[in-house]
Structures are given as structure tokens and as C-alpha cells.
Amino acid sequence: MADSSLAIGWLLRAAPVPGLTLAEWDGRPDGSAELAVGVVWDAVRADLELGIEALDRLRLAGRAGPALCAVRENLVTVLVPVGTARSWTPPIAGVTAFGRGEPLRVPVPRISFGPYHWLVPPDGSGFLTDPCWLRRALLRAQGVYAAVQAG
């Protein structure tokens, strides 16, 4: 994994008050803090199974940017460029895009297990998943699950 301090610095760009975010990461048992979407990235959230399948496809293609899992909510969230939420059409069942004004609970970069954890941690470079590649991966993953349910 890349230098954690670079990743923390990158994430803190989305923190309304960076000092409070650091304290929240340190003080919460799950190591998470609420950051603002639409400042450094937008987010695309998918049902867990669909999101994991799509993320696996993106990883294999070398196209996966930071992505996290919210275990209790059964969701995978992929970070995408700002503006993606406005242009996320047509909708995909089980998938929501959100941008400016929405909060996102994010774990500190080193967390790879627990209620909120990184599936693909940020490396601090600013690399984000391309929304076109993500849409393609989600649609293919949806096709896999439709075939399994039909079969």
C-alpha cells in the first residue's frame, strides 16, 4: 500500500474541518469519519453483491480507484470524479450516484475490515474510477446476477 499519510491528506481535502475528522477517525471504534461528497469526488453506491462483482471486474482491468464497504448497509461505494452524480443516467437498479451536499462515512485508509472498510484503499494520488468503466462493470455484473437467478 502507498504511504498512508498521502492518502489521509487526500481524504482530508473533503473534510469540512480536518482536525475534527482526524479526531473522529481516532475516537470512533469503527475508525470512520463523515466526509463531504462533491468536493474531491462524487460517489456511486451499489448493493453489496453487485458492487463486489463490478469492482472485481475493474480490478482485473486495472481500473479500480478507491472503493469502500459499509457492512451493515450491505453497500459498496466507489469514488468517482466530481460531476458524475449529475450525469449518471440512465439509472441502474440497485445503484445510486450522489454528489455535492451528501455525507459519506469513510474509514481511515489503513482499515481493511470492520463495519466500514476499504476494498480498494486510496493511495493519495487522486486516482478515481472512470464512471464509464464503472457503468460497464455494473451492467455486466447485473447480467451475471440476472443469469444466475434465471438459471
Image (tube, rainbow, N blue to C red):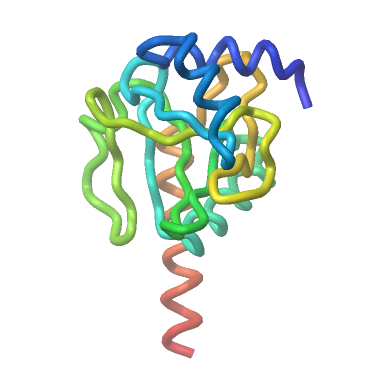
Judge from the rendering whether residue 43 lies leftward or rightward of residue 115; answer left or right: left
Percent across and percent down for residue 100 are 25, 23
Image quadrant where residue 75 sits: bottom left
Measured from the top left, where is residue 99 in percent x and y? 27, 29
Q: Which of 101 and 59 lies nearest the eye of the viewer?
A: 101
Establish if 124 lies above or below 149.
above
Q: Residue at x 32, y 31 (%)?
A: 103
User: Picture coordinates of residue 127 (x, y %)?
Assistant: 57, 21
Q: Is residue 36 visible?
A: yes
> What residue is at 22 percent from the left and 25 percent from the top?
101
Residue drawn at x 46%, y 79% is: 147
Which one is in front, 59 or 42? 42
Residue at the far bottom in the pictured view: 151
Q: Is residue 151 left or right of residue 93?
A: right
Considering the image in quadrants, where does the N terminus appear?
top right
* Residue visible at 49% across and 54% down in the picture: 51
In this rendered view, identify the residue nearer to me: 28 or 14. 28
Q: Is residue 139 visible?
A: no
Image mark count: 0
- The relative height of residue 19 versus residue 97 in the rendered view (above or below) is above
Image vertical order of residue 89 relative to residue 72, above or below:
above
Q: Residue 17, how many percent across, how many down?
A: 39, 10
76 with respect to 55 (left or right): left
In terms of depth relative to the viewer, which is nearer, 137 or 75?
75
